[in-house]
Image (spheres, rainbow, N blue to C red):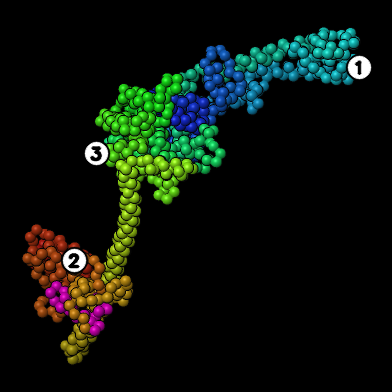
Amino acid sequence: MAVARHSPSSMHTTGTFTTLEFDRIVEAVVSCALTPLGAEALQRLRPLTDPRAVRTALAHTTEAARFAAANGAIPLEAPQNLPKTLDALAIEAQPLEPAQLVSLVTFLWSVERVCRAVTTATSGPYPALSAIVGGSANWNRECAEVRKKIDASGDLTDDASPELKTIRGRLRKQRNRLRGNLEAYLRGRETSRYLQEQVVSERNGRFVLVVRSEHRTAIPGIVHGTSSSGASLFLEPLSTVDINNEIVALDEQERDEVRRVLLALSTMFRRRASDLRRTLTVATDVDVLQARASFAEIVGGVEPAIADDHTLELLEARHPLLMAAVTSRLGSATGTDDHIEPVPVDVVMTPPTRALVITGPNTGGKTVALKTAGLLSLMAQSGLHIPAAAGSRVPVFRSVFADIGDEQSIAANLSTFSGHVTNIVEMDRRLSIPGLILLDEVGAGTDPVEGGALGRAVVEHFRHRGAHVIVTTHDDALKSYAATTEGVGCAAFGFDPETFAPTYRLAYGSAGRSLALEIAGRLGLAPDIIGAAGALRSARESQLADHLAQLDDDRRRLDELTHDLDRRQDELAQQMTRLKAREADIDRRERSSRAHRHDSVDGRVRNARDEIDQIVVSLRERAAALERVAANKAARRETPLSTGDSGELRSSAQAALDNVARRFRTPDPAAAATDRTDRPPVSLGARVLVATLGVEGEVRSIHGSEAEVEVRGKRLRVPIRSLAVSVTRPAKVQSRVKVQVNDPGGPLEEINLIGCRVDDALVRAGKHLDQVLMGDLRVVRFIHGHGTGQLRRAIAEFLSAHPLVRRFAPAAPEDGGNGVTLAELKD
């Protein structure tokens, strides 16, 4: 995957890049490049005109910025001589110099580090960067070979080849011989006195002695030259000639071997030319993305959305060339102004508005706003983040034109007005839709009446052609046109009403005043001149100025009211949020309270069942004891037990069960405490939960510590402490739990369930077993019939889980077969 190439696009600009200083933005982005390759590619940065390509370029910049924020700067580096190295590599049979090979290896290893950083990053995914680095070749073997044969100083090591090692070994040996021979002349008593200097010098690649001219014949040898003064001779003693010849020959052999090794190393890369081109492309594309991401960080940029509906919405936009961080990179920061940052401005054109007229006082920011809108549009279409707030949107223009300032050529013999008209003619000829037209002081430089009319006509012409038009003006007629024409917006830069100093804030819907006289006075123009100018204004002009001033005052008051309304809406929203949070908290507490009550009731039911089981066991033990006593008495023919004994047993069991029932009806203190927490007091008509019954009802009357509650049409009198006011909608009432023992009124050995629904049958079966507890039965018949078998299966499941049932089975065929289930109870 390659980054979109920004070769000159088809966008029509006619000098717009220079007028809007887009070329300086390119220069700033180029300064963020890490390699000469990336810098060269960024020099061709131009706006794209395909919306899909623009979206892709912006997304790639965002991805690179996200990678840098999560993983640090991209570790790409390349020496400045890399282009020359690559040019030399393209020449066949030409070895690279050691320094060039080292710089090439440094570059390739940095590409390898980039690839590794992208592929191993855990903060991803980074699809664009991953696709780019996937095209890189591996150069580990070649780089290691170069590092092994070239040392840190840039020289080939002795181990670069066996031949080079042998040659250098012989060279060291011969040089040691030569040094020893020459040093003998320097130390010799007879020879040292002939020497001009006690040093060994070199001439023409041969080592010589520096001999006084008058002792030319004292030491036999070959003269290789004289000093500039003629006082000294450079003499090679005859005894060193053969050694010097050997060294010269070995030096030549060394140079040949070094060249051969360097050529071999160069050929490794030259042989993989296609892989090298792919790697260079990867490095270039990565560098382009990181440079765009770095520039985004410098300007505090965001990725704007591409508006398919042609909306131009630049929120809190700032002109990048007014930022100290940008100007310092361009070397154009100016002393005391370095700390001054541009004031953000909103430039908004929403369909059907296609034209925007910007008015306001001189030096108020109109031209800067105009340039900001054009420059940020070009930046966005070039894949650059823009210095604006999140939520900004831009269309994709096919042409952008700007006529700003007095840029006509004196050599062309054009006046200010003629220059502007010439530019407009060229815009009209080259305009492609969608297009952006930026006109500063449209219609200026000629008769005000005719110029104003021409300005309105130009705006209307380009608007009807479908272009976005932004103009600045001081012309009152053009202001009126903007305020009264559908599809044309009007905005004005404000000023301080007391000092007339500009605020640099753009207010939409306002046809601001130019304040020429006021600003002239603030700048020091003589008061008598200001007064005379005011007197010379016509009555109509004064009325219009007063009317505009009144409109500005009205707009300011409206802005204040709007601000106050927004503040009140924010307060209401905050109150609503707090109320919803409180309601949610009450609802949470209610659910927690209900859950606590349900858990409490479940626990009490379990405890009640355990106590009942214990009562049953105790009852059966006592009944068995009575049976044994009765049997003993019968064996001894004594008086049998009276019915009072069994009645006492039955009464004791009934009392124990009644005690369980009373405790169960008593409210759980913990649950009651939970219910009372943060609950409103019980009042007449309130919906309340009767804790002892587990049902809800409505309070009809209150009598001291008791209340009369209507539940399902019946009125109950219950203690107030057992009531809890419900804060939620009435839930479905659940049946209360009863623990009741009735005196059996019929045969206990069987129960007929034929014709009952499953739920009713199970309730009846449970009650019947409770009654059986008071008798001495061991087997109970459940008559359910054949039918579909559903009731039989339900009874079987019920009996399998009942704590009193030992086993159960269908009756014998003669006793009803599968239509009857016999249950044997535990002792």
Q: Which residues are magenta?
A: 704-723
Q: Main secondary structure of the magenta part?
A: strand
Residue 531 in the image: state x and y as whole percent.
Answer: 42, 44
Q: Nearer the viewer, residue 7 or 476?
A: 476
Q: Which mark is residue 732?
A: 2
* Extreme residue toward the bottom, this view: 639
| Separation (CA) of disc 3 from disc 2 | 61 Å
Q: Which mark is residue 780?
A: none
Q: Nearer the viewer, residue 684 or 451?
A: 451
* Extreme residue toward the right, this view: 190
Q: Is residue 353 left or right of residue 320?
A: left
Q: Is residue 256 above or below residue 827?
A: above
Pair 3/1: label in front: 3
Q: Nearer the viewer, residue 451 or 353?
A: 451
Q: Is residue 24 left or right of residue 160?
A: left
Please name the residue that numbered disc 3 is placed on: 486
Amino acid carrying mark 3 in the image:
Glu
Name which quarter of the figure residue 14 lies in. top left
Residue at the image point whose x is 40% and y is 22% from the top? 414
**Could you tell me if the residues under marks 3 and 1 are in contact, i.e. CB atoms within 8 Å?**
no
| Separation (CA) of disc 2 from disc 1 | 129 Å
Disc 2 is placed on an element classified as loop
Please name the residue that numbered disc 1 is placed on: 193
Amino acid carrying mark 2 in the image:
Lys
